[in-house]
Structure formats: structure tokens, C-alpha cells
Image (cartoon, grey):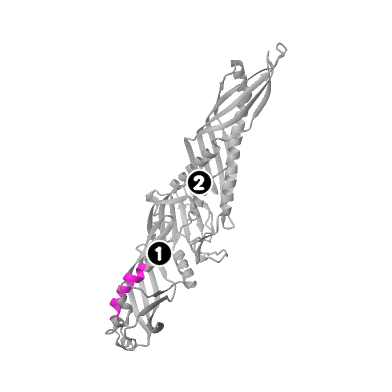
Amino acid sequence: MGAILILLVLSIFTSSGFSQLQSSETGYISVVISEKGLIFAKDLLIENAIQTLTALTLPDIHQSKKIPLIGSVSASLTNITVYHIDVPCSTIQPGESGIAIAASRATVDLSMNWEYSYSTWLIPIPISDKGTASVKVKGMEVGLTVNIQNQNGTLKLNLVQCGCYMEDITITLDGGASWFYQGFVNAFEGQIRSIVETAITKKITEGIVKLDSLLQTLPKKINVDKVASLNVTVVNGPLFGNSSVEVDINGLFIPSYDDAVIRYLNRNSQLSDFCDGKLKMLEISLDEDVFNSGSKAYFKAGLMHWLVDKVPDQSLLNTASWKYLIPKLYKQYPNDDMELNLTLSSPPVIKVTTKNIGVTIRSDMIVNVLDFGVAVPVACISVDISATGVPEISGNNLAGSAQLDDFTLKLKWSTVGNFHMSLIQGVMCVFLDTVFMPYVNLHLRKGFPLPIIHKLTLENAVIVTSTSKIIICSDVVSNSSKFMFPSF
């Protein structure tokens, strides 16, 4: 049932302590589900199972039995209903290829209707009676083992073992003679025990089948917008440690229209210990290649350009403001409005280190003069920007912001004469700080969705960086009391 949390996130990380050998194919987004996370998944599963089993109606029981001096007695139990289940103790344990869950010391309360009839040679008229009864099951043990495999890029569940055993059962009748009570208990205790054990085992089996069906319907990509999607194809394992579970997904951005499953091979993954001391349920690791693949996807889509015709100080976009800095510009186009056509010359490059997240942006800025409403290019300036990224969690999205560190300018060509970049350095600094970076941050704060399953939300997330990776250490909470099993 670590599969529940594997679904939440569908991502994973690599651990040297895992029992299975690692594949040569490694995902770019990864998550380690800790012992705390597995306990959360187990509790969530048991809570849903209890809700599903409560109000469960069991098959009727009919039986005839010969009783000395009485004769043949026909008795029936109907409307046998489970109305309360309590599970005070449960455990979850990863194995070599799956998860084992055990619930112990559970109690089950049932209600039912009973009736009987008989006739003897002494009294040829049939005698009958009916009433209600309650059943208390104590010391019930339930266990199951689920095998979890990667099948064609999706997780596959197989129920290996499932069993239910009752230690003690107490039947209380409302009405009825004492001789009938003892006969009733002797006649029906075994059958009540059997139908309860069978029903619980059957429902758990059906639940695993439905959970597996849900896994099979999960998409292999998550649409971020009309341009890019996140490839969430499972590429490894899962792998199982002594107290944690790992699954890898591809995790790179692809064009939204691309239905092909992309595989990236022969990357070595290293497990970090960043979340060990934080007692979090999940450790989500994103390789810097995830962000660089997104950068490339949007660049190839032709979206990394921007026409600027409005700035906080609008006078800067008029040739009059440049009369003394670039005299030929004002002489040739006196008092004309301007616009800036900013286009990235290559995809931004993101580099993650233990100290920070560095971003390098290379762009060309073409200066247009609006001569009688017609845009006339007059100069092209190469603008190389260095910035620092600051990641943050917004809901289930990984968002962030960036701040300007440094920039360099180089004149590529000009129709208004050569002019030194030092003349416009100060103006460009103001432009980048007040216009360009706020525009970039407007988009960064939207973020992109992490592969977290619907109805689960990250909580109290902490973000740290290591060499080439961003690691999110987080708990999760369920937004619905009926999370995985709307019906068994």
C-alpha cells in the first residue's frame, strides 16, 4: 500500500540501501517515501477500508439441525450487517518486491435478525420465534502482501497474499430460550466466523484490483499548459528498502502535442540524506535537467520573446531621453516613441549547486523607433543576464522567483552610429530591475505541477539544494476522507 503514496506523487529517488539492483535507466524527478510516509499511506488505506466495510451486508445463513427431544430445528440469520470496526494496531513493512500490511487486535460489531421454527411428534403444530442478535468479534487479524512492478511505464499491483483470522466471537441474542441460545451458538458460530473472514478478504481483494485499475489509468504526462507537458512515465523499480519505498519517473518536459514516450538512459543517481533529520513523509528530488528541458521546450515553441512598449518611466521610450547619450538617434528620429523587442538567443541555462540556483539568460534586444507608426530597427544589443533563482512551493506546484545578479551588454549592430555600452549601463540596470525581472517572476510564480495525485496536498514543505538537484522534503495531507476507494 506504499502504492498509495507512490500514486500521490508518482516520482522517486535512489537509495543505496535498497534491496533490488538499480536499473541503468534513471528518472530526473525522484521521491523517497519515508517510514512516516508509509505509515500515513497505511493509515489512509485502513481508514478507507473501514469506511467501505462499515454497513456491509453479509450473506444470509440458513441451517437445519436435529436437537434431542426437540427434533429438527430450522434456523436462519438474515440482514447480517457490519456496523462498527476498530483497528487499534497495524503495521506496514516493505519487502523485496512489495509491501506487507498487517492489522491486529481488531474488533468487529455486527447486527442481524434471527428466526427458527420446529415441530415435534409431541406437538404437531409448528413452533417459531424470531428476534435480533449482536455479534462481537475480538482479536481479528488481517494481513496482505502486494507486489508492485513497473509495467510499460505504469505501476502494476498484484495481490500476493491476503488473509483474515478471528480469535474470539461472542453472540448475544435478544429473546429466545436458553436451550435455543446454546444450540444457536453451536450451530452458527463457525458460519458467522467464515462469512466475516471471507467477506473482508474478498473486499480487500476487490479494493486492490480497483487500486491497480486506477494506477493503469494515470496519465503518462501532465499538461503544464498548451506548450509543455511533464513526462511522468515510470522508468524504474519501484525499489524497496527496510523502511522506505522508491519509484523513478522520467520527469522531463516535452511538447504538449508530443505523445511519444521519451526515455533517457545511463544517468547515475545518488541518494541524498537531506530529509532524514526532518521527519517528512516524502523526499522529492528534481534534477536540474528537468528545468533545462522545460527551458528548451518553451524556447523551441518560440515563446521566449517580448515586445516592450510600456515601462514605469515611459519617457525612456522616447528618443528625446537619448538626445545627449546617442545624439544621432535623436537627430535622425526627433521626439519619436520607441519599443524594445527582446528575444532570447538560446534557452536559459539553470545550474543547481549546494549554494544557489544559477540562471544564465542570453538575449538580443532590438531597439525599434516608431517612425510615423512604423517600427524601424535602429540597433541590436546583446544582453547576457546572470540571476539567482529562489524556489518555493505553491499548493502542489513548484514555483519561485529570480533576482538579478549581473549583466553584460554588447552592441551587435547600429544604424545610428556606434555608442559605448557604458553610456546606457545605468538605464539598462533600471530596465532589468523594474521591467524585465518582474515580468519573469510573474511567470515563475505560477510554477509547474509536481506529480502529486489528486486529493493530496503537500504540507510544511522544506526546499534544499544539492549538486544538480532541488530536493523538497514535505508531508502530505488528504483533502478527502474517501481518498482511494470511493467504493469497493
User: With 237 as the anchor, is 330 left or right in this view?
Assistant: left
Q: Main secondary structure of the magenta part?
A: helix
Q: Measuring 61% from the left and 24% from the top, which residue is drawn there?
A: 114
Q: Position of residue 5 (x, y in %)?
A: 49, 49
Task: Reply yes or no: does residue 326 show up in magenta.
Answer: no
Determine if residue 64 is in view. Answer: yes
Image x and y of residue 368, in percent: 38, 81
Q: Residue at x 54, y 39 (%)?
A: 52
- Residue at 60 percent across and 26 percent down: it is 113
Q: Is residue 426 magenta?
A: yes
Looking at the image, is mark 2 or mark 1 earlier in the sequence?
1
Circle 2 is placed at which residue position? 483
Residue nearer the viewer, 24 or 221: 221
Query: Which mark is on residue 335?
Result: none
Q: Which residues are magenta?
A: 423-438
- Residue 169 at least partly seen: no
Q: Residues within 10 Å of mark 2 (few under 14, many from 20)?
A: some
Q: Is residue 335 above or below residue 234?
A: below
Left or right: where 474 falls relative to 330? right
Q: Along the line of sight, which residue is nearer the eye, 234 or 404?
A: 404
Question: What residue sits right under mark 1 in the picture?
Answer: 444
The span from disc 2 to disc 1 (Cα, nearest Å) is 31 Å
